[in-house]
Amino acid sequence: LVKGILRHINKNFAFKFPYSVALLFLGGFLGYFEWAYNTMKKDGVPSADDMWYMSQSRWTALSSEPTLLLFMFLPPLIYESAMSFNFFIFSSHAVGAMLLAGPGMLLQVFMIAITLMTVLPYGWGLKESVMLGGILSATDPVAVVASIKDLGTLPDLAALIEGESILNDGTSIVVYELCYALMFEPETTKVQFFGRGVELIIGGPVLGMFFFFGSYIWLSRTKDAQEQTIVTVSSAYLCYFVAEATPVRASGVLAVFMQGILMAGYGRHVISADAEHALHAFWDMLIQLSETLIFLLAGALIMNMAFLSKQNTFNNFWADTGYVILLYLLLALIRSFVVGLCGFYFRRYGLNLDPETCSFPDFLRKLFIVVWGGLRGAVGLALALSVNVDQRYRTYTNDPLWADRVLFYVSGVVLLTLMINATTLEFFVTKLGLNKESTASHAVYTEAKRYLLDTYEDFLDDLQRQHVNPEMISARWQWVQKLSDLDIDEDVPRIPGGVPEKEDDEPVNNEKRLRRAQSRKVGPIRRLSDAALKSINTIRPGAASAANTSQQSENSSRGGRGSLTSDLTFENLTVSYRTIHHARFLMTLKVFYSVHFKKGLISKRPFLALTHGIDQSMQFVGRSDSDPDSPK
């Protein structure tokens, strides 16, 4: 119901409200109602008719077992996110994502720890500050995946942000467990401590590979849609359970991510065509359900457990609230510094981030989106709840309210990142112009629309000829045009050098027919030949020069997306045509590969590699020409 209302609102307003943020607010209202009920019921015993309260209390009781939240919702979200990756795009960003989630993450943790020890007046030690820094550094995959999917653009940058968030989350859990061992397991030696870190980091991907090979063999031996769906779902949950709840002691996040990414790159072809639709339908339903429940619970727990229930716990509640806002700003600055350091690598080796394919201003804009897309969410909240329910933390630290403040600060940062960053992410992407299509793609699609419109008008003209179709003499052509309208604007821009249409005199109609006849012979993107232009000049002298002048003035006045080549002049028309022809050749090649893939002549993995190469080649079309959009 909430998603249906949001879709209606987002269609009618320019500003789009994310689904995850709406669920967070709804969960906050539920948490407030539960807190108000507990406040009114002094004895804490609900009456027999309070079924709504009893039902909600069963869900919010998960705060006493926060790891159960991760076991319930994290495996399907991580597995589906990794399995839906374009493997070849992610492989190009894999090193960059690991750089952000590895050394970048550790640098960020220690910078946050130093900030906490310096700014906050509670006298925290290094161990508890590092633990809180690790929790706050976790860019939650659940929140990031939800926002990126709502955005629906920037596939290359989305792969980097999404991959970094998942790997970053695994690193955060590793830092949390190592800090826990330092606090409460003093007998652990340095060698054992180092071995546990290696086991968590290396054991997760190894375990994920093991489960991938097992599910791959099973999937290759069956074509039943239901059985293949059961195998994918159960293997994701089982992999996380073995990693986290058995003596294996590996990172469950990294294990499930490795299993999913290997399935995306090497195991998708074993899923039968009949089962693929059912598999995607079931996973979409499971992901929607998981996202809905986890954000509702997060909102309820933040409002009830972290805010309202802590009003009388702290000596100065509003001072701690101010520290939350200050901490949010400092976290943004620290993440900007870390991403800026990693930007040196991205500028040299990043996909579509190097100087050949991306200008320096565009590179800075994309780095800003990487910084702004660092959302916090359910994973950090679950770790903070784990700290809050463990009574040993209250006696270990110098601050007896340290565990309460951890939950309060993490919940505040989660709330601010979802309310501010997630809500304005699409605005910044649009404002910075990062979702604009390339010049070559825009030219091809514009000419395709013009070709469809011309073909439609020609066919309609042929039908209206009474001597050819006398049976249609009584047809109501206004209704025919209304029912068969292609919903394409009449002023779709043409190729530079073409002759504009005017409906005020008869010679122009002859010119229109001549242009259409020419387009049917040589295709919609070729300009008129010299003989055709000479014929047009014979019909109406000066038409070509007037056409060029009117076309240039129209393009310069229209600007923006509506003009095909707003900055091109008559002298560089050959460059524009070469760019368009290159783009059309690549798109034709992509269709050729698609046809062969559907016929079974090539398998899925080579098909994905070929089409990914074509998509990347489209970014280079026109780079060596005098294209105004070229970074050169």
Image (cartoon, rainbow, N blue to C red):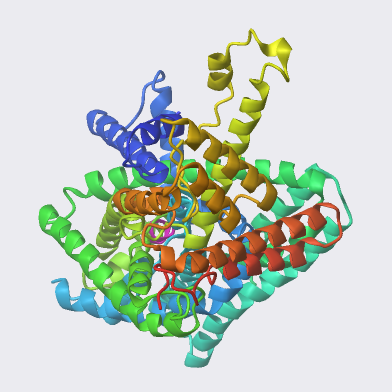
> Which of the pair 456/503 is nearer the observer?
503
The quadrant the N terminus occupies is: top left
Q: Position of residue 53 (x, y in %)?
A: 38, 28
Q: Position of residue 219 (x, y in %)?
A: 82, 56
Secondary structure of the magenta portion, mostly?
A: helix
At horizontal 66% and vertical 20% (from top left) the residue drawn is: 465
At horizontal 58% and vertical 37% (from top left) the residue drawn is: 513
> Which of the pair 612/68 is nearer the observer?
612
Q: Is residue 123 left or right of residue 358?
A: left
Residue 529 can be seen in this image: no
- Hey, which residue is sitting farthest bottom in the picture? 191
At horizontal 71% and vertical 46% (from top left) the residue drawn is: 279
- Hey, which residue is sitting farthest top in the picture? 474
Q: Is residue 225 left or right of residue 550?
A: right
At horizontal 79% and vertical 42% (from top left) the residue drawn is: 226
Any magenta on residue 286?
Answer: no
Q: Position of residue 121 (x, y in %)?
A: 13, 71
| Magenta range | 379-383
Residue 467 can be seen in this image: yes
